[in-house]
Image (cartoon, helix red, strand yellow):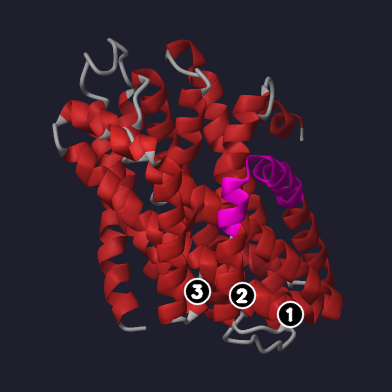
Amino acid sequence: MKKFKKLFEPFNGVLLGAAFLMANSSIGPGFLTQTTVFTQKLMASFGFVIIVSSLIDIGAQLNAWRIIAITELRAQDLANKILPGTGYFLSLLIVLGGFAFNIGNIAGCGLAGNVLFEMSFEQGAIISGIAALILFWVKEIGKMIDNFAKILGVLKIALTLFIAYNAHPPLATAITHTFLPNEISSIAIVTIVGGTVGGYLMFSGAHRLLDAGVVGEKRIKEVNKSAVSGIIISGLMRFILFLAAFGVLSQGALLDESNPPASVFEFAAGNIGLKIFGIVLWSAALSSVVGAAYTSVSFFKTFHPLFEKYERVCISIFILISTAIFVGIGKPVKLLLAAGAINGLVLPIALAFILVAARNKIVMKGYNYPVWMLVTGWIVVVIMGWMCIQAFKDFLAL
């Protein structure tokens, strides 16, 4: 327990904020849906997916955050420094992944509207898209929602822990198959990693530290703690939700295919649990809509003065297009799974760009980047690259 507390010390607001920015960004509607769906498929063996995914997450995020902190450059600018033009390509990947995430977030809003008010998924999405635009344009309300989102981050974990307790999961079975799985799924690992550190998520906290001036070799230990803490927070929430889903499934619960995580909460805590789930899901999804749009646009706003000048307009268009695509396509659960998978595909490419920069002495300002860190990073690139190929085949078969 002392070691766990020590991990978060000495933390200032920026470091803790960066950790929670990354963690809260990942603990959204896609997180809830992906975890529930894959627990239903793999049962106790999904614990193994969480462990493997968390190790990959740490390897990817530690490298990305450290290199960005040392070079003091945003990911897209860093890529352009190493090989002119690649920053534009990286930004394109991130923005496309951001679209996938945002469509998934809008889908989460639609699911929440259905749970709370029994409206259609499309109606919930349209109302939420309008609400997101209002929150974005009215700064004062946006700040209030931002602070409220931090409270909701703690509430999500506490509520899910309560559901897990009520679900009475077979702990011995869960722990055993977490380390000795009966089944291993490539698409599950790629989707979970993509939903945690894929796409813009890997860079959101790092860019926040960069903006706050937490950079340079002397701040590396702080950057390390912030990066690892974000993964621990999201991993803890993932494991608690897994236990909750595994518990109700072990009791014979049949999950609603149109909204699997809601079924878990309802089975364990009745109608009250269902409504609280709806509130938390909608709040998390709505804040993620604005956050994903803002971060995605930040990846190309430095390329031309017009993007920076009309940043608000670009973000608004981003939200409107995301909403329109979901309303046109529907199928919120499949979209939420696809968002994680698509951003899982982006991860090995984006990380490879960052790792190449670590060998450039000029860009790294003379810092000798640890060889073991580089090796760890490239192992993540190779593993994720191979798994992405397998997952893409599996996803096409769904």
Residue 272, position as x, y percentages in the image = 86, 75
Q: CA distance from mark 3 to mark 2?
A: 39 Å
Task: Kindly indicate whether the residue at mark 1 contacts the one at mark 3 (C-beta within 8 angstroms).
Answer: no
- 2 or 1: tag closer to the N-terminus: 1
- 3 or 2: tag closer to the N-terminus: 2
In reply to whether residue 49 is colored magenta, the answer given is no
Residue drawn at x 67%, y 44% as measured from the top left: 146
The amino acid marked with disc number 1 is: Phe
Residue 182 numbered mark, or none: 3
> From the viewer's perspective, is the residue at label 3 or at label 2 nearer?
2
Residue 114, position as x, y percentages in the image = 66, 80
Residue 124 numbered mark, or none: 2
Residue 372 higher or lower than 296, as above or below: above
Q: CA distance from mark 2 to mark 1?
A: 9 Å
Residue 81 higher or lower than 120, as above or below: above
Residue 277 higher or lower than 355, as above or below: below
Residue 231, position as x, y percentages in the image = 56, 44
In the displayed image of the protein, which residue is found farthest to the left?
A: 84
**Which secondary structure, mark 3?**
loop
- 3 or 1: tag closer to the N-terminus: 1
- Magenta segment, which residues? 132-154
Near-viewer residue (352 or 318): 318
Identify the residue under disc 1. 117
Picture quadrant where residue 270 is located: bottom right
Residue drawn at x 75%, y 62% as measured from the top left: 160
The amino acid marked with disc number 2 is: Gly
Task: Kindly indicate whether the residue at mark 1 contacts the one at mark 2 (C-beta within 8 angstroms).
Answer: yes
**Which secondary structure, mark 2?**
helix
The reply to whether residue 45 is visible in this rendering is no
Residue drawn at x 53%, y 22% as measured from the top left: 212
The amino acid marked with disc number 3 is: Asn
**Relative horizontal placement of residue 161, taking residue 213 as reference (left or right):** right
